[in-house]
Amino acid sequence: MKKNIPLFLLLLVSFVSFGQSKKDKVLFTIEGEPTYVSEFSRVYKKNLDIIDKKDQKEIEEYFDLFLEYKLKLKEAEQLKLDEKDSYKKELAGYRKQLSRNYLTDEQATEKLVREAYERLQKEVKASHILIKVSQDASPEDTLKAYNAIMKIRDTIVTHGVSFSQMAVEQSDDPSAMGNKSMKGNLGNLGYFSAFRMVYPFESAAYNTKVGEVSMPVRTQFGYHIIKTEDIRDNAGEITVAHILLLDKKEGENKEDPAQKIQDIYSQIQSGADFGTLAKRFSDDRSSGVNNGQLPRFGRGRLSSKDFEEVAFSLKEPNEISKPFQSEFGWHIVKLISKHSMRSFEEEKPNLERKIKNDKRASVINSSILKKIRKLYTIEENDKAVKNDFYALADDTFFSKNWQKPTDEAFLNKTLLQIKDTKITYDEFATYLLKNRARVMTQNPAAKEFINRSYKEFVNGKLLAFYESDLENINEEFAAIYGEYRDGLLLFDLMETEIWEKAKIDTIGLETFFNANKENYKWNKRVEGVIASCSKESAAQKVQQLLKVGKSLDEIKEAINKEGNVNVIFSPGVFEDGHRNLPENFKFSTGVSDIYKDGTTDFTIIKVNEILPASYKEMSEIKGKVISDYQVYLEKEWIKRLKEKYEIDINKRTYKKLKKLVK
């Protein structure tokens, strides 16, 4: 499981030493191990760059934190936390993920990114006809499939037979004809944009003129011909606000969200402010505090298709949807604004990520492989395929009975050498044995399968060697990897020495809580019910009915008539400063005055009881107490580390450093 390393740890490890220059001074030593001025300077400057000015500390504070960080690393090494299997596994996983960013070619990537961006400006509507053929089919079978698709194309282009008719009659895509449970699409795939189809198919669709039929296109599925039906502008992005009521969980004691969302909608229809209601009632607190507004998004960006469809159906700013249900709960959506497509520079990082997970990556791989071949000395025994491995492809090659050779002289032959690293026949034979399983049912041609497997195998070995060598050839990679390596080590140390101890030390936690009770107090609170009205006349009636002791159900029945929801009640205990209490709320029992906020928000509070300021119970704030206890334990632990290890600070160098950075 990937750990979320706290920000303060990453800030402290955001440097890696690549060797100090002769002029670099020792800032301090721990047990004789030196730490240099350049190391501290890098982390100090980086903190200044990424932290708001108001949150920045004095250099003395940064130095103390840096020294503590070095002490923690020393302790982690002493405890041999870097030798734990879990640590090694986590670090290896991160390295693999990070290295993907460096297994690329910038020029090839830039070209693909620009192409994708241009395509994203449009949505293309296309139909296709497929003739299936395996990637490892024999030349004879491949030619047969190609001739078949060309014959279909000729029937359409030359003889005028409709594309949809040929799709139903000839396409190997079953969706064209359909079945009893699904109506056929006649080959029509509808509108799509970049990244929705495999790359060769997408390219053919975009490069074919509207109304024309492409030449055959080869994908992993077979041969396609594509008719581009239409091209339209992309719908772009929108900004919306929403009110969300989460679905009621089984056994949960709360109001029915389906009914409450209708009540809220009725208030909006009666003129209540959407943003005010979002702040008060939306269960999406991250957007609720911002009047319900969500970050802008485009088609296909959200995890809820239902939400997206409703949002994009809104035509004009300020248009509000009816309540609807998604997989998350009940929503009301308000359109704030529509946006044209993002600029190239804004969209570029997102496109780069998508390209690395797309068939386009093969274009980049081809480019980087050329560079790898120039970077290293490579000796390749490519004749081995025809001379030795074709002979292995007997009648049992694609059956479960086939086994790789056992002759050690054969298996120990060198197939490929990268610098001093040798790759043997044995490794390729094992690769073939494993890869056969995924193509057995496809009945591929053996020689074509071996040829393709050989290319994949060699390319994989070249990329793997390059990846394993990144620390030596790429300084940026070495720096980022080093940051995470130390951050992960500190995370494990803190978890072992502080965080877990604070959770399980119940006696120590209780003692700490009792000694610091003044830090855990409730402000003055009220127990009662808050009434929210969208009209002043309704608020006045609610106030009167509350004063004469009517129940909430009786008041709803009297006020909410003819489908109009004029009052919403929120019972509970509310602390001074709670978001639902008016800013100038006066604490007194009974029914309050009417508090106005604009022209569509009127609030009355019926206070049953005033709860004075009091000490909180441990059960109410255990998480907060544990967090504070962890801070206390860490301070005490740092004191012990400073006593445990010999620290020698170069005071003259430190003094000069402070003058330089201030």
Image (tube, helix red, strand yellow):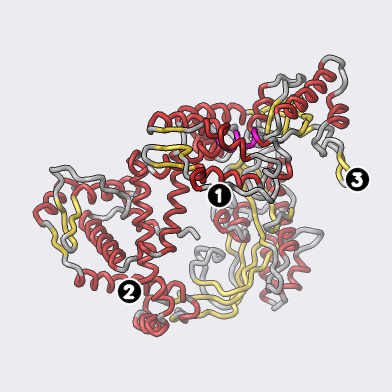
Q: Earlier in the sequence, mark 3 or mark 1?
A: 3
The residue tagged 1 is 406
The residue lying toward the viewer, choosing from 273 and 282, is: 282
Q: Residues within 10 Å of mark 2 (few under 14, many from 20)?
A: some
Q: Position of residue 567 (x, y in %)?
A: 70, 63
> Which stretch is magenta?
447-454
- Tell me the element at label 3: loop
* Residue 551 in the figure: left or right of residue 643: right
Q: Position of residue 107 (x, y in %)?
A: 46, 27
Determine the secondary structure under disc 2: helix
Magenta-drawn stretch contains 453: yes
Gap between marks 2 and 3, in whole Å? 68 Å
Query: Which mark's residue is nearer the viewer, 2 or 1?
Result: 1
Q: Position of residue 200 (x, y in %)?
A: 65, 29
Q: Quadrant of residue 340?
A: top right
Q: Residue at x 74, y 58 (%)?
A: 262
Residue flagged by tag 1: what amino acid is it?
A: Thr
Q: Which dot marks residue 633? A: 2
Query: Is residue 374 left or right of 28 when viewed as pictured?
Result: right
**Residue placed at 61% from the left, 64% from the top?**
603
Q: Is 662 situated left or right of 570 in this image? A: left
Q: x, y (%) of residue 253?
A: 68, 74
Residue drawn 39% across the image and 56% down it: 7
Which sits earlier in the primary sequence, circle 2 or circle 1? Answer: 1
| Type of amino acid under label 3 | Lys
Mark 3 crowdedness (10 Å alpha carbons): few <14, some 14-19, many ≥20: few
Q: Which residue is mark 3?
A: 180
Kindly report the distance in space between the C-alpha atoms of the residues bearing marks 3 and 1.
53 Å
Residue 414: numbered disc: none
Q: Classify mark 1: residues with Cα within 10 Å, few (<14), some (14-19) or many (20+).
A: few
The tag earlier along the polypeptide, 2 or 3, is 3
Q: Is residue 253 above or below residue 200?
A: below
